[in-house]
Amino acid sequence: MSDQIDRIGTGPRERHYRGPKFKPLRRAVDIPVWGDLVIRIGLALFLIAIVVMIHWWDRGGLVDNLDGEVSFTDVIYFTMISITTTGFGDIAPITDRARLVEAVIVTPIRFAVFFIFVGTAYNFIIKRSWESFRMARIQEQLSDHIVVLGYGISGSEAVAELIERGTDPAQIVVVDPSEERLIEAEAQGCNVMTADATRDGTLQAVRIERAQNVLVSAGRDDTSILIVLTVRALAPNVPISMVVRADDNEQIARQAGANNVINPVRFTGLLLAGSAKGAHIAEYLADLASVSGRVQLVEREVTDEECGCSISDLPSGGRGLRVYRGGKALGFWEDACQNLQKGDIIVEIVPTPSGEERGDGHNGRHADSSD
């Protein structure tokens, strides 16, 4: 098993992002809440200490209307009422220098301390409460959604293709540890979450057990396989599709629980080999894989009206290629495909609406006129 683990890692993570805006499902924080609070309070106390030292150095410019003497305690007292703008008037600056210090130095520090505490109140009370409420609302609505774990090149292309195929972006949840990568997904209307997808808490937060499908593309095979193991433990019945880079990891990925394992390197090799046998084979395969082409592959369950029909005579108008029955793949030429049964899964080629409108074989790439 150790030799299998050694060959899982395949290189650096993918990077692919752009866009101006980010609204997370849940925002990750680099430091704990109490640590942020301590930093804010410490900064405020540091600024107050500076004002205390300035007032103590310039105490000759202050007057105490009570006893005429300005002690260190009086300086601390005057600093606090000055910063909070309370201003009882019992201690006041009387010299030009003292008043200049109040105007030029103390006033900016007063505003700085004010904004520190206002920002703290916003961050810890209003903002966090609102984000918690918003996250809870999103979670309540998550059901039959698609979870994309990893938003590199493959993940971003998958999300774009899903949206182009008609999937509501609100039904897509994208999880990635990098906030920058999620900018594009959020801009498209997807739910996003900056988190580690290998952790149970992350997957539970996106309601993984209610998902319709899970797409895994973490950029590294070892990370992706760990994610698949975690997903399968929390959601035993959810279909999982995963991208791997190394051929040796395909079997390991299936053993981890992935239903579909895609190797983009192998697929690229198939396209290259196909192009060597015909000028248009690679273009046709790309046409099938994308909704932007004239035709596309569709997988669906046989309808009641199709039971008893032949795969070559589908009411949908598509051309049936394969039937899955009882976990077994049947080709369109086999006798079993001439009598469709309830529960069969059909894979067929259907024309896309855009392809029907064009009808001239030109869509930015070559298409066969037989479509």
Image (cartoon, rainbow, N blue to C red):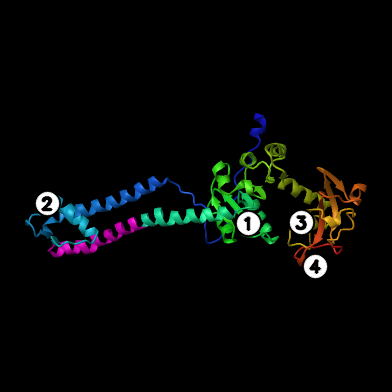
Tag 3 secondary structure? helix
Sequence-wise first label, 1 or 4: 1
- Looking at the image, residue 336 sits to the left or right of residue 100; the answer is right
Could you tell me which residue is drawn at 89 percent across and 53 percent down? 308
User: Looking at the rendered structure, which numbered label has been put on residue 71?
Assistant: 2
* Residue appearing at x 69%, y 40% in the figure: 246
Q: Disc 2 marks which amino acid?
A: Ser
Marks 3 and 2: which is nearer the front?
2
Check if mark 3's residue and mark 4's residue have beta carbons within 8 Å: no
Residue located at (41% from left, 57% from top): 126
Q: Amino acid at mark 4?
A: Glu
- Find the magenta span and give its range: 93-118
Which numbered disc, 3 or 4, marks the residue closer to the eye? 4
Q: Which disc is residue 162 wearing?
A: none
The N terminus, quarter of image: top right
Inter-mark Cα distance, 3 to 4? 18 Å
- For disc 2, the neighbor class at 10 Å (few under 14, some 14 to 19, many from 20) is few
Give the CA separation, mark 2 to mark 1. Answer: 66 Å
Can you identify the residue that label 4 sits on?
356
Q: Which amino acid, by three-letter code, is at mark 3?
A: Ala
Whole-percent x, y for residue 239 in the image: 69, 46
* Quadrant assignment for the C terminus: bottom right
Q: From the viewer's side, name the closer residue of 3 and 119.
A: 119
Q: Badge 1, how many Cα within 10 Å: few under 14, some, many 20+?
A: some
Q: Amino acid at mark 1?
A: Gln
Q: Can residue 99 be found in the magenta stretch?
A: yes
